[in-house]
Amino acid sequence: MEARYSIVFYFLMLLALSSAFAFPSKKQYKPCKHLVLYFHDIIYNGKNAGNATSAIVAAPDGANLTILAGQFHFGNIAVFDDPITLDNNLHSKPVGRAQGLYIYDTKNTFTSWLGFTFVLNSTDHQGSINFSGADPIMVKSRDISIVGGTGDFFMHRGIATIMTDAFEGEVYFRLRVDIKFYECW
Amino acid sequence: MEARYSIVFYFLMLLALSSAFAFPSKKQYKPCKHLVLYFHDIIYNGKNAGNATSAIVAAPDGANLTILAGQFHFGNIAVFDDPITLDNNLHSKPVGRAQGLYIYDTKNTFTSWLGFTFVLNSTDHQGSINFSGADPIMVKSRDISIVGGTGDFFMHRGIATIMTDAFEGEVYFRLRVDIKFYECW
Amino acid sequence: MEARYSIVFYFLMLLALSSAFAFPSKKQYKPCKHLVLYFHDIIYNGKNAGNATSAIVAAPDGANLTILAGQFHFGNIAVFDDPITLDNNLHSKPVGRAQGLYIYDTKNTFTSWLGFTFVLNSTDHQGSINFSGADPIMVKSRDISIVGGTGDFFMHRGIATIMTDAFEGEVYFRLRVDIKFYECW
């Protein structure tokens, strides 16, 4: 009798264990932490030194560093230190800085590659979040990887869904970043 | 009697649990997902604007942007948007694009550092895979990290084994990428 | 009686399981592997070609490639291949190379963004460790993410705590890197 109970129990536990590791469909995942933040990029164009937050620092042969290159800016690298805000207002009090680089990497449409960090320093959040991924700019909503974090985001991983919230010519753009952590520590 | 059964069982379960977390040797790991893909890089040299897929955008002092720098190209950064194919034929129908940057980073041999994304868009795969790592080019087979993924590769991590499958002078190279995911969701 | 034992045991096991997954506070984490290493960066300034280990390869408009840019070097990208040592002596036998890039990314203080790899090749360690993150240089101790590894560090993740151990003007700096893996395979 006891043995039978134990066997039943053994299978129940195996079931419990396997359900903790098997993920039948990604649809069911819920983030263990969720943040929505905005960041604002003002690229230097030779005339806006005072309020520019990013600069072109590399360009393909024949291009210069104050005008984004032809061919959909292919080959431009920009370095940025952009304010992060809780809403879509550039003049809201920043809760941190988005720092890193973006690269324009296609000749026949606008796409970029992103390597950057959110450095958050507010009453709500102290820590950094590291991002990496391809950004097909013309797509309304696109996903990149959150590859790690520090401080409040110690060892976190997840997905960031990026949307272009606004842009003005080729000088200003604002991105809405929907930060969904699926691995929290 | 029952207590004894339970104690035995307890240790069996502990054993089961610990074996799920202890990895005595990495040799035993099997990928949970496995892909082999090729990508093709044609670097711009001032004469091949029509079919170049990458461009030198940064170079050390004294070098230019149409000729890879001396000293094993140390200091060159190239931005690329390369076709990905299922076989080693440049003219096969692409299943996606490899986008990002590579950097030549040694003065006395050929090594590079890679930060790029596979953006896959085919009937088989929809999603992106993010790579990062050192590439000691002269070694036949070298490993870099897969640091995240989106879409079909949601939250995946793994190892990519890279081999130079072909090269022609300093204009064309083809890499075979053996993508082994060890963390699938 | 047996059923009661099993129920008690069931809750004990659930407790054991949940404690393996629930992390009430990050304070309690202990690294599963721990390394302390140093690396040494000597930036090319036009006169030290012989022993420079890094070079400025991108700069904002108006700057050049042998002098770090004004405004806290904002916009400079340096590519490096730096020796890694076990102690703080530049002339100790290297155990590997730190390879990748750093970017100066703020106009009103010194901060950088790092994307690089430790390629270790010694009797103790064979493998690579990939790093990514923001480095607020003026802060004594700062954390970046370890986003993956290969070889002995297969699939590892963790946190690297960086301290500036020494610097000489704008030509030499030495970083102490406290590598703490929290995910070992």
Image (tube, coloured by chain):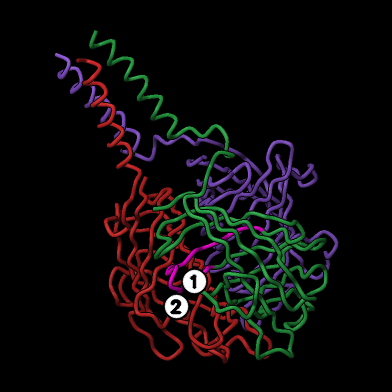
Chain colours: A red, B green, C purple
Instruction: Please tell me whether mark 1 sits on a helix, a strand or a loop.
Output: strand
Residue that appears at 41% across and 48% down: A154
Q: Chain of mark 1?
A: B
Above or below for C138 versus A112: above
Amino acid type, residue under disc 1 in the picture: Val
**Residue C83 position within the rendered picture, expressed as x and y whole percent measured from the top left:** 74, 51
Specify whether residue C2 is painted magenta. no
Q: Quadrant of residue B166?
A: bottom right
Residue that appears at 64% across and 64% down: B176
Q: Identify residue for label 1.
A: B119
Specify whether residue B131 is painted magenta. yes
Q: Which residues are magenta?
A: B117-134
Above or below for B139 versus C179: below
Q: How much space separates mark 1 and mark 2, taking CA atoms? A: 9 Å
Amino acid type, residue under disc 2 in the picture: Pro
Q: Quadrant of residue B100?
A: bottom right
Task: Tell me if B6 is positioned left or right of A63 in this view.
Answer: left
| Prevalent SS, magenta region | strand
